Image: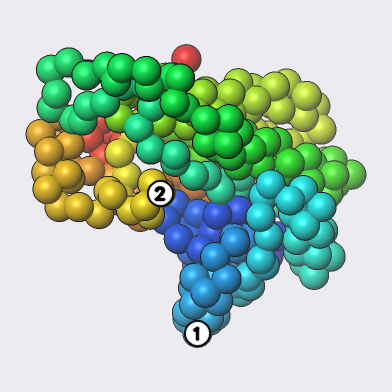
């Protein structure tokens, strides 16, 4: 069974890899022998984390690129594939959160409070930026990866969606929820198109995880305690919680799984969203 989880020498790219879930993906793959390129716009964070992992003896490098700049993203993916001589795994993870949507509320609220005129004040710039990063960026990452995977007849594309793709939360930005729901369906489209080529496409859908998205509000201990009260396991998720699932979806062991969105949440556990 161990060989089914062997990713030694695999070429891997991770967008949004300088922190949070993306960094966790990169860490676990590199720890199991993969060669990993972390792609991010955060130059300082990228340099710091890549140097830390290299110092631990792992094969990790950083590449600066914005997923909304598709030419730059293509170059970063192409360069990684050229260095490794292969591209086996692509984590399309980069994402942003524009803040609350058309209504206001938080965990523990009995009823969301509607903000009068909220949709009228929701600007094109705010909407388009989130869609461009969270949905168009996933498309561009998958496209860049497929160009290298298809000729080899092997590949794993793993997309970070969100529990917000299925469960509407008033405090989560409306554009964020729409983009993650779109990404969920995009994964299914990718799976249908690429399955015959030996390429799988799946999604990891985190619930409330402590990351830097949305300005890092999830690091607030009071907020974590409030959220924990509403979930059965009374805990919030941490990036390390996704590592085993990320390794499975990136490894040969997952060859029979494609087109799935797997929900992983610190409070609700693991499940497949139909």
Percent x, y of residue 15 = 60, 53
With 145 as the anchor, is 243 left or right in this view?
A: left
Percent x, y of residue 141 = 70, 44
State which mark lies toward you, 2 or 1.
2
Viewer can see residue 146: yes
Residues at marks 2 and 1 touching, judged by CB atoms closer than 8 Å: no
Could you tell me which secondary element the residue under label 2 belongs to? helix
Q: CA distance from mark 2 to mark 1?
A: 27 Å
Percent x, y of residue 58 = 55, 75
Could you tell me which secondary element the residue under label 1 belongs to? helix
In the displayed orientation, state which residue is furthest to the right. Answer: 151
Viewer can see residue 25: no
Above or below 203: residue 169: above
With 43 as the anchor, is 243 left or right in this view?
A: left
Which residue bears the numbered disc 1? 55
Residue at 44% x, 39% y: name it: 98
Which residue bears the numbered disc 2? 213
Percent x, y of residue 88 = 71, 51
Mark 1 surroundings: few (<14), some (14-19) or many (≥20) residues within 10 A: few
Which dot marks residue 24? none
Above or below 212: residue 116: above
């Amino acid at each position: 069974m161990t060989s089914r989880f062997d990713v030694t020498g695999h070429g891997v790219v991770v967008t949004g890899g300088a922190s949070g879930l993306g960094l966790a993906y990169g860490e676990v793959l590199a720890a199991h022998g993969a060669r990993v390129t972390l792609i991010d716009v955060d130059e300082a964070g990228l340099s710091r984390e890549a140097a830390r992992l290299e110092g631990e003896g792992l094969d990790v490098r950083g590449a600066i690129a914005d997923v909304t700049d598709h030419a730059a993203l293509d170059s970063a993916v192409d360069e990684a594939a050229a260095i490794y001589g292969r591209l086996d795994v692509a984590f399309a993870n980069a994402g942003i959160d524009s803040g609350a949507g058309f209504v206001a509320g938080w965990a523990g609220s009995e009823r969301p409070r509607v903000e009068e005129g909220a949709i009228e004040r929701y600007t094109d710039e705010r909407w388009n930026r989130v869609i461009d990063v969270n949905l168009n960026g996933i498309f561009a990452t998958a496209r860049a990866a497929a160009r290298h995977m298809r000729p080899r007849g092997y590949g794993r594309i793993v997309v970070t969606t969100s529990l917000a793709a299925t469960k509407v939360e008033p405090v989560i930005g409306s554009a964020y929820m729409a983009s993650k729901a779109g990404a969920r369906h995009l994964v299914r489209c990718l799976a249908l198109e690429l399955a015959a080529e030996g390429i799988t496409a799946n999604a990891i859908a985190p619930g409330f995880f402590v990351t830097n998205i949305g300005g890092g509000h999830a690091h607030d201990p009071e907020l974590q305690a409030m959220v924990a009260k509403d979930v059965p396991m009374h805990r919030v998720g941490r990036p390390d919680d996704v590592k085993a699932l990320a390794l499975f979806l990136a490894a040969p062991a997952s060859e029979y799984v494609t087109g799935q969105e797997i929900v992983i949440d610190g409070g609700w556990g693991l499940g497949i969203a139909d």
